Image (spheres, rainbow, N blue to C red):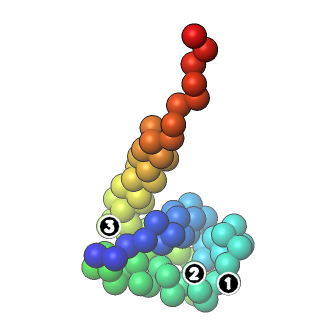
Amino acid sequence: MDVTLKQLHYFIAVAEELSFTRAALRLHLSQPSLSVQIRRLERDVGATLLTRTSRSVELTAAGRGFYEDARRLLADLVRARERARPQTERPT
């Protein structure tokens, strides 16, 4: 599985906006490049995460679970990065 952090950010934006157009605007990307990244993510994960029609985007059952896990994973990464940063020196 070659899922990237960027793809997780992209998926979260689409899942929250329920729109590729609004997510692309939010991410400062073109809609076609966002769609390509989401298709790659779905291929790498091995599941359809979003149901797309010409008028709407909805999360599938797999997509809802993946969304929750992706948000948790990114939050854990933020915490890990904060823990790894050197602490400022304490006054003696």
Precedes in sequence: disc 1 or disc 3: 1
Amino acid at dot 1: Ser
Q: Residue furthest front?
A: 92
Give the residue at mark 2. 34
Relative vertical location of residue 63 with respect to residue 48 in this rendering, above or below: above
Nearer to us of marks 3 and 2 is 2
Q: Find out whether the residues at labels 1 and 3 contact each other: C-beta distance under 8 Å.
A: no
Q: Secondary structure at mark 3?
A: helix
Of residues 37 and 50, the one nearer the viewer is 37
Give the residue at mark 3. 62
Rendered-image quadrant of the N terminus: bottom left
Of residues 51 and 84, the one nearer the viewer is 84
The residue located at (40%, 78%) in the rendering is 41
Residue 49's spot in the image, x, y percent? Answer: 39, 73
The residue located at (66%, 69%) in the rendering is 27
Q: Find out whether the residues at labels 3 and 2 contact each other: C-beta distance under 8 Å.
A: no
Q: Residues within 10 Å of mark 3 (few under 14, many from 20)?
A: few
Give the residue at mark 1. 30
The residue located at (51%, 41%) in the rendering is 85
Q: Residues within 10 Å of mark 2 (few under 14, many from 20)?
A: many
Residue 16 found in image quarter: bottom right
Amino acid at dot 2: Leu
Asked if residue 75 can be seen in this view, the reply is: no
